[in-house]
Image (tube, coloured by chain):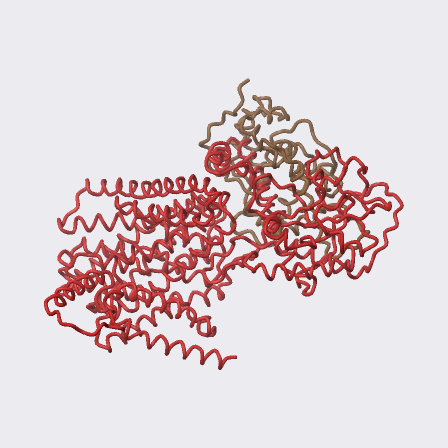
Chain colours: A red, B brown
Amino acid sequence: MDRLKRTTFILFLMLVASLLPLGGHASSPEVGTGNGKVRDHQGNGDTTHKANYTKKAFPVLSFDYKNVRTPFEISLWVLLASLMKLGFHLIPRVSNIVPESCLLIVVGLLIGGLIKLVGEDPPVLSSKVFFFYLLPPIILDAGYFLPMRPFTENLGTILMFAVVGTLWNAFFIGGALYGVCQLEGDYLGKVELLSCLLFGSVVSAVDPVAVLAVFEEIHINELLHILVFGESLLNDAVTVVLYHLFEEFSSVGTITVTDVFLGIVCFLVVSLGGIMVGAMYGILAAFTSRFTSHTRVIEPLFVFVYSYLAYLSAEVFHLSGIMALIACGAVMRPYVEANISHKSHTTIKYFLKMWSSVSDTLIFIFLGVSTVAGKHNWNWTFVIATVVLCLVARVLGVIGLTLVINKFRIVKLTTKDQFIIAYGGLRGAIAFSLIYLLDENHFARKDMFLTAIITVIFFTVFVQGMTIRPLVDLLAVKKKQETKRSINEEIHTQFLDHLLTGIEDICGHYGHHHWKDKLNRFNKKYVKKCLIAGERSKEPQLIAFYHKMEFKQAIELVESGGGSKLPSAMPSTVSMQNIQPKKPSQERALPQVSKAREEEIRKILRTNLQKTRLRLRSYNRHTLVADPDEDGWNEFLIKRKRMKDLEKMSHVNNYLTVPAPPPDSPTIARARLASDPQAWVIKPVTGDIPTIKVELASPQSPESVSVVDEFKKSSYEQEDEDGDGLVMKATSLVAKKDETGEDDKEPQQRLQRCLSDPGPSAEDEEDEPFLP
Amino acid sequence: MGGSQSDRAHKFQHLSDKTGFSIDQINSLHKRFMSLTENEGVLRREHLDNIINLAVNPIRRQITGAFFDKRNLGQNEDGYLQEIEFEDFLTILAFFTPPKQGTSEEEKQNIKKEKLRFLFNMHDTDNDGFITLDEYKRLVEELLSSNETIETETAKAISDAAMLEVASVTMGQMGPDEYYEGITFAHFQKILKGIQIETKMNINFWNLDTIRVQCGKSK
């Protein structure tokens, strides 16, 4: 197996190598300006043609590369990035030690070197391409799937780190560098204070791309992840303001107090403005998605386009595009997800992951290529000073801020946490692109800055990126807990929320929970009605969660097949009858047909009931939590048939819960009992009688009850004559056509109806006590 | 709670040692207590019902009950008190303080257990040591009661499913004839293992000094 993997990898390399000269030749001009050149060539070609018109043979086959050049180059690069990604996962040993970002930079370096060898000019990462095409997918992916609960709980801490921490870093590094330059004298002496401050502000920003790339692989606990990641997202506003501030005034040369004051105002405008722009677009997107029930196919498009517009609109006004994008994604998500179909949701998820994955890869490769390509000016003092100062500033900043923050936090940050936060401050491509954008006339030392930035990036990504994983293990930092989001946890989390809000009210303390509760109530009362279509606007969160869980269970149940592979998770044979209170029971003869079989079936059902798949707990770009409904319909049908075979041999107790589906949730499947139509009327639960119907030991005709999947019903009704899903016996009439056919073979079917089904026909049967 | 200043200070010191609040916090909580009880000094249920914000809380009944529950106040018997004093008020609120920095792991586990016990008592209203299906169902219904439409069927389904899950997680194998009484405290602990209670079930009492201590009622 190893040899096979190695050979495959070598083949990949060869394939890639063969693409390189082509790519290198193709991208010799800057990627961004490729278009212009193409048009020029065409124009020239045309005129020459007309001037020297001679009759030639009709060209059967011609070669016209120039026309296709730009899209071709772009596709080649994307293909290269994807192949690299594939390649790395073929050799797991290396990717365990070295984070992927490092490998990609190395590959970029190699490619850059190769291109230079060929004699072409390797392309440099154009800032325009970076900021408009490569960065937005990553940020949107992060923002859309941002875990809101930990984010809002730690918002104060995150903001402190992002704003105050970045400011501290910027000024400390800038100032100290200026001091070093002055000390050094001759060569560096000409570097002005403002240039240093600008450089400091750019180099101090923690980069979301790098943080994501590295932190995803180490599976650190949620708190630390959200702290560092949140900081990297929110410090964009600070960086933007400082950058523009210093850039503007570097030409002038001095800064007055008014400018500082204006800078502060500008910061507020940039951050709040960005958030507002994003929120506005988010609401628009949510509102639009309310009406998409008939055109499901373009639903994902709205999400992407509105978000991208939010980003671009923010960039128009020099507001923080990143914050706009995050706000847009976070605002639109709860409403959009309530409105769109399940398939659209999957599409959005996969597209975002795909784009961000490719972007991320491309960014790192380009970083490597740009290193080779760019003009460098290596100055030992400056570079070493930068690296050292970055580290020192970061550590000091984190320690200082934590002292202040811990006074206000309930869960204090320990030293271990502080270390990880400090160590996780990685720099990345944003810093590089910002420096690259600088005007050379104003900044004489631009190439020196560039070199220094690249060194810092390399240092953080390579050294810190590679060592953080063993350090995390060494320090025994808490890892992410793979918790199943069970219905119990959901119930109790909500209960806890209400409880804490209540206690806060009793104490008269307007704390975190109080405001959150107010926001929730406002949301429920006004906002949801506007933005969510139909009945789902009234659906409380618990019920929504519960329906989601049911849906997944139904899918999983069928997926797991007819018992041929029993899931290995903790099987249990607990069923509804174990829970229902004993009532004076009647004498019933309940022959247990093949008890072993019954046990087996119960095992499957129980296990599936436990294995609630999480919707999105993992933010790992590389391994999406498997979506249960990815499997093709064919497998679905096969497995269903297997299930039926199983049912044939025993009586089946249906322990799936059966909620009555809300009338218009067409695209979300529910597992429900398909009994006769009159049973669908939701009968009010009378008193404390458990609505579990037990069939009397009477010679009534066995009925069949089947679990129906909504989305199967319409398309498969014709094809499926055996009934769908789980087939059980009930004491009601048959609803589906030929279901009883095979069920008749089982003479003694008893219904053990589960849970909340109101019962097939409440009139003719009393509410019977359950099986003892 | 009259008496001279030193008497009160001494009393507060005693309370501080017992419950873990700081003197400042106890002072402001005392002010709050007084305004809640209209300076009577003993808290009754109707005082808590008068808080406006609490009236929209879906589980207000259980919260109010928890304050008067004898089990939470350290007494071994069942039932509810009619009125409580400031010391009992503080005892209940002490359940919501975070473990101090530097507590040992074992103490943290104890604190976690106490908090879970508090929650358990809130659910187990008849104090038989089990959270039965009915009690659970009532809990779910109350949680859903803040919506206009109470879908009783779904509530029942949810509570059944939850109960089922608890049973399967904790009991594993059960024969068809066995009966699962209800969630015992041990099971309760087990299923809520994933939620870090000791970090989540906390109120930040630090800024009580600055909060205006008028309560929400108008008499």
Residue A668 on image: x %, y %: 57, 47
Residue shown at the point (68%, 36%) measured from the top left: A682
Answer above or below: position of A585 versus B63: below
In which quarter of the view is residue B1 placed?
top right
Extreme-top residue of the structure: B219
Answer above or below: position of B181 versus B49: below
In which quarter of the view is residue A261 placed?
top left
Q: Nearer the viewer, residue A236 or B215?
A: A236
Residue shown at the point (40%, 61%) measured from the top left: A357
Residue B178 on image: x %, y %: 80, 51
Residue B76 on image: x %, y %: 73, 39
In which quarter of the view is residue A32 placed?
bottom left
Q: Is residue A568 visible?
A: yes
Q: Is residue B162 visible?
A: no
Total marks shown come to 0
Residue A351 on image: x %, y %: 43, 56
A652 to the left or right of A503:
right
